[in-house]
Amino acid sequence: MLIGCSILGAIMKGGGGLVASPLNGDVSAVDVVLTLDSTTDYLSEDYVIIGDEKIFYTGKTATDLTGCTRGYDGTEAAPHYDGDIVYTADASSINNAFGFNIAAVQDSMGWWGTITIPFRFLFTTLPRIARMNMSFMTGSLAIIGWIWFAMAAGFFITLALSLAGARRV
């Protein structure tokens, strides 16, 4: 549901959405231009996330995000290094929801990532869902948390009834 809403939100905004690209060179905590491998699919004005820092930008070229406001939304400006991944808010929310960075696992492990990701999902993501940990659902995503809670409760009730033999699935 989170992925579907992110894609719909990206379509409605005219781009953006689930986008991630590595930095092309180091940046200090005060740099106002971020050079990426590509800014294709990033919005012309939005904010991105690198590590724990949010960075608001007001323009873009083919490879640069320009007019950056570092430490946006109360985060702390920090240096970042060549190859660090620059995420849109939607991509960062999905990583937080899953409890691990899917793209980083796949990139660092290659084809082994295909084997590892389902296990990480099983042992990291499912326990988060079972605990109903929705700390990543803040701001405009809060309504999705309530919908997610209702769907998860329905799933667990249906599963319990099925296991008890009261309902055939």
Image (cartoon, rainbow, N blue to C red):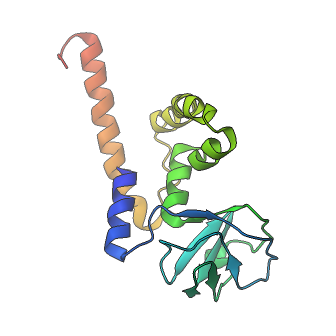
Q: Residue furthest top?
A: 165
Q: Residue at x 40, y 73 (%)?
A: 15
Kindly indicate the quadrant of the structure image that contains residue 70: bottom right
Residue 7 versus residue 27 in the image, above or below: above
Q: Residue at x 62, y 31 (%)?
A: 112
User: In the picture shown, does residue 94 fall above or below 60?
Assistant: above
Location of residue 152 in the rendering, given as x and y in whole percent from the top left corner: 34, 38
Labels in figure, total: 0
Location of residue 51 by image quarter = bottom right
User: Residue 5 or 85: which is nearer the viewer?
Assistant: 85
Residue 102, how many percent across, how many down? 57, 45
Residue at 72% of width from left, 85% of height from top?
32
Can you give x and y, in whole percent of width and height, for residue 123 in the image? 56, 29
Q: Is residue 40 left or right of residue 33?
A: left
Q: Quadrant of residue 114 in the image?
A: top right
Left or right? Give the position of 146 relative to 16. left
Residue 97: % across, % down: 51, 48
Q: Is residue 58 above or below residue 24?
A: below
